[in-house]
Amino acid sequence: MIPSTFSYKRAGSAEEALDFVASYGEDAKFLAGGHSLLPLMKLRLAAPEVIIDLGGLSELSYITDQGSYVAIGALTRHHDVEHSELLGRQVPLLAHAAGQVGDPQIRHRGTIGGSIAHADPASDLPAVLLALNATIVARGAGGSREIPIGEFFQGLFETALEPDELLTEIQVPKPASGAWAFQKFTQRAIDWAIVGCAVTDGHVALVNMGGTPLRAVGVEAALAAGASPAEAAARAAEGTSAADDIRATRAYREHLARVLVSRALTEAKSRS
Amino acid sequence: MKVDLTVNGQDITADVEDRMLLVHFLRDVADLTATNVGCDTTSCGACTVLLDGESVKSCTVLAAQASGHEITTVEGLARDGEMHPVQRAFHEEHGLQCGFCTPGMVMAIVSLLKENPHPTEEQVRTGLEGNLCRCTGYHNIVRAALAAAEMPGQVPA
């Protein structure tokens, strides 16, 4: 399968990337690792006229300690998040979850910023960063702005990013406790999760239970009221709108959400 | 557009379509046909090659993205007529049946052993989760990876 024709531009800096998108407008698409966008282009589900390759922007590949939070450059690859000693110590949930994305080859190419900007509700890291209450930094012609992750995902593949904005950094607050867990259910390692679940500090976020990653509000309320993991997990499907598709029915996804949340809460509790 | 890749140590410059995939560049431009197109959907790993020494699926990389970078295919592993230890281990452990997944399996294992020179069996199995063998010959593939890890000089120069 071959993508439809497009014009390839390689950005040498974030400024040049923004200049390109200013000149080509909505016909252009940023390409980071390409492991979400290129498969869609090969299936002709996406057909941008201009591809702006960000792969050369090593300035946006970093993981640094900023005191109360860890700053991660948007072009940091899953492989580097997985093996970061700093994240392993300060935000082990994120390092662990990055190591569960796809397979080693995918993790050598895919980036955290690309995954977030693509906003596939079946991807692991959007839900993990939602549980972690991350802040997204976007740069546009007028400068940078910060977007709380709770306002970032607006719908299926839709985010708060303007067409001429570039996601540059993800700021991850250091969790207060070591009570974390990540659970997902896939048919094959390389598949997207049928359902997944991230738990940290009493925050619970769900993968693939609606058009965006979702906080499991019923579970969080139950936990805050002192419920046991099993009692809280029974409310995992509240407020969700999981799809019925070739891989699973909605009822099966709701069942899986309850099971995985229960396992994750138990696992997180055992770490705390 | 003009792309310039180093493939198995050789500089290759070519004028290609912007949309050309790396796997097609390797097979059709560089004339290196060991790298197979399997599923063509980033799933099966048959097209795995090394990009700057790390395994990637070449059906999901543009030739343009790889311009300026180093690619190694299975044809580039042997040295002075001697098979690479991972190739030798596949031979000795009967790590292939039909052979279609083999070039990708070998490159995935070369990358895996570079990151983790002495993996456990479980780490090999997890490390190969991006490569499918439709003959289901996984036991001998895993044996070959473990045998290669014990051979001297397993990391390519």
Image (spheres, grey):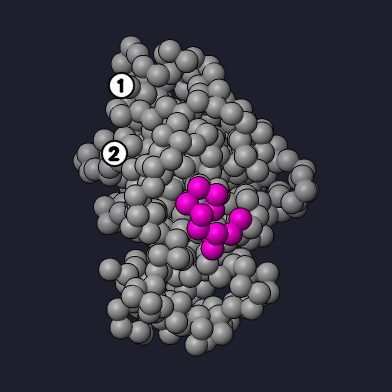
Q: Is residue A97 visible?
A: no
Q: Nearer the viewer, residue A125 or A259?
A: A125
Q: In terms of depth relative to the viewer, which is nearer, A195 or A102?
A: A102
What segment carries the magenta color?
A: B27-37
Q: Is residue B42 left or right of residue A71?
A: right
How far across and how far down the image is residue B47, in percent? Answer: 54, 57
> Residue at (71%, 53%) from the top-left corner?
A255
Q: Secondary structure at mark 2?
A: helix
Vertical comparison of A184 with B126: above or below? above
Q: Disc 1 residue type?
A: Glu
**Residue drawn at point x = 77 percent, y = 44 percent:** A245
Identity of the amino acid at label 2? Ser
Give the quadrant of residue A212: top right
Q: CA distance from mark 1 to mark 2?
A: 13 Å
Q: Quadrant of the N terminus of chain A?
A: top right
Residue B41, image x, y percentages:
62, 49
Q: Secondary structure at mark 1?
A: helix
Q: Mark 2 sits on what residue? A: A58
**Is residue A200 found left or right of A213 in the rendered image?**
left
In the rendered structure, the residue with mark 2 lies on which chain? A
Q: Is residue A187 magenta?
A: no
Decide whether the magenta segment is chiefly helix, strand or loop.
loop
**Which residue is labeled 1 in the image?**
A15
- At 29% from the left and 27% from the top, the residue drawn is A13
